[in-house]
Image: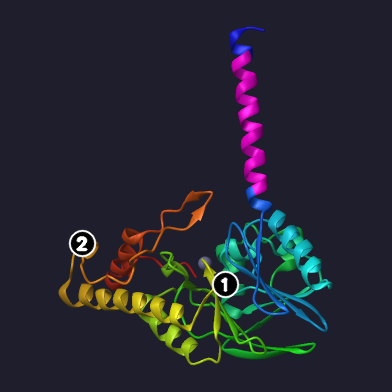
């Protein structure tokens, strides 16, 4: 073989290895059991909750790819012994919804009205053809109590924050709150101003969430935590909201905003990793705070 042929072969071998690595990474889900009937699945994307009920399995959020959705469904059946009868999407972002199409058409899918509207407008390209059959089939605007077999859940839209359509799920029997992306645990959050997200309103939403009756927390991203973990995140968001007020009152420049010393609650926070670290860091959140306080962004829906 000639030298270039060896190089080509080496390149093909490298690409195949890379594809296998990504495939394995995408399919790999870590399982944590929170109670007899409640499990958390962690992988590339938002945290998924799996609840066993006497009337079938409930899944909250489906990660980033239909391939992961298939793995979530397989694991859910393995863990609970029953197929999935209900999907709940906490908000419209692709890392919480794009696994939906792996579930059977006709499965009940729940979200807020705003989330369905965002899916149909901001992510319309994905939700066409077969995929559209797994769009939310039922929506609500503020709160709903849900009975599935022997389990009671409360779905609450506490207000704007990460987007303007997020819901949280209170598993009443287990006293566990799935916050969706209204909480990132020790990770810098994304603030989707374009879809109605808001830092000051996020603070109010977190205060409403803390009034609920729960002990454990499944955040949208990061490790499971407790009330103290959620309060720590509230401190972080409160500092961001205070900085936003200062930006508006003193007409602070972006440069001055980025060098603020008022943000201290992010000690130990990291950027989210999805194979590579995403550009969600201290500079990103402070930039979003400045953009919201000065109106330097455009609502898309
Ligand atoms: Zn999100």
* Residue 296 visible in the current orientation: no
Q: Is residue 5 above or below residue 163?
A: above
Q: Is residue 5 left or right of residue 133?
A: left
| Residue at image mark 2 | 259
Q: Is mark 1 within 8 Å of ligand 1?
A: yes
Pick the residue in front: 192 or 261: 261
x 58%, y 69%: residue:
92
- Return the x and y of residue 142 as percentages of the image width and height: 56, 89
- In this figure, which residue is indicated by the disc labeled 1? 91
Q: Position of residue 176 (x, y in %)?
A: 60, 83
Most extreme residue toward the left is 250
Q: Is residue 102 above or below residue 233?
A: above
Front residue of this view, candidates 85 and 72: 72
Q: Quadrant of the N terminus?
A: top right
Q: CA distance from mark 2 to mark 1?
A: 32 Å
* CA neighbours of label 1 inside 10 A, class few (<14), some (14 to 19), many (20+): many
State which region is magenta. 6-24
Q: Is residue 10 magenta?
A: yes
Query: Toward the viewer: 150 or 224?
Result: 224
């Amino acid at each position: 073989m000639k030298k270039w042929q060896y190089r080509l072969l080496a390149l093909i071998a490298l690409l195949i290895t890379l594809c296998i690595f990504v495939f394995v990474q995408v399919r790999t889900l870590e399982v944590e059991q929170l109670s007899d009937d409640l499990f958390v699945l962690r992988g590339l994307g938002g945290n998924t909750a799996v609840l066993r009920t006497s009337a079938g399995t409930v899944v909250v959020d489906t990660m980033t790819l239909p391939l992961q959705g298939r793995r979530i469904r397989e694991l859910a059946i393995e863990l609970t012994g029953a197929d999935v009868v209900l999907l709940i999407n906490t908000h419209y972002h692709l890392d919480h919804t794009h696994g939906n199409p792996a579930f059977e058409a006709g499965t009940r899918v729940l979200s807020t009205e705003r989330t369905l509207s965002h899916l149909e407008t901001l992510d319309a390209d994905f939700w066409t053809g077969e995929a559209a059959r797994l769009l939310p089939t039922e929506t609500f605007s503020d709160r709903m109590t849900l009975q599935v077999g022997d389990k009671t859940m409360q779905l609450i839209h506490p207000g704007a924050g990460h987007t303007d359509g997020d819901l949280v799920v209170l598993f009443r029997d287990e006293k566990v709150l799935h916050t969706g992306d209204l909480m990132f645990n020790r990770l810098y959050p994304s603030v989707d101003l374009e879809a109605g997200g808001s830092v000051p309103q996020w603070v109010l939403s977190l205060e409403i969430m803390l009034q609920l009756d729960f002990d454990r927390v499944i955040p949208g991203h990061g490790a499971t935590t407790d009330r103290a973990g959620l309060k720590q995140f509230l401190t972080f968001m409160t500092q961001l909201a205070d900085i936003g007020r200062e930006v508006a009152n003193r007409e602070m420049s972006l440069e001055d905003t980025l060098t603020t010393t008022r943000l201290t609650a992010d000690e130990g926070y990291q950027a989210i990793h999805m194979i590579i670290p995403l550009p969600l860091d201290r500079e990103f959140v402070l930039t979003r705070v400045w953009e919201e306080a000065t109106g330097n962004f455009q609502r898309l829906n």
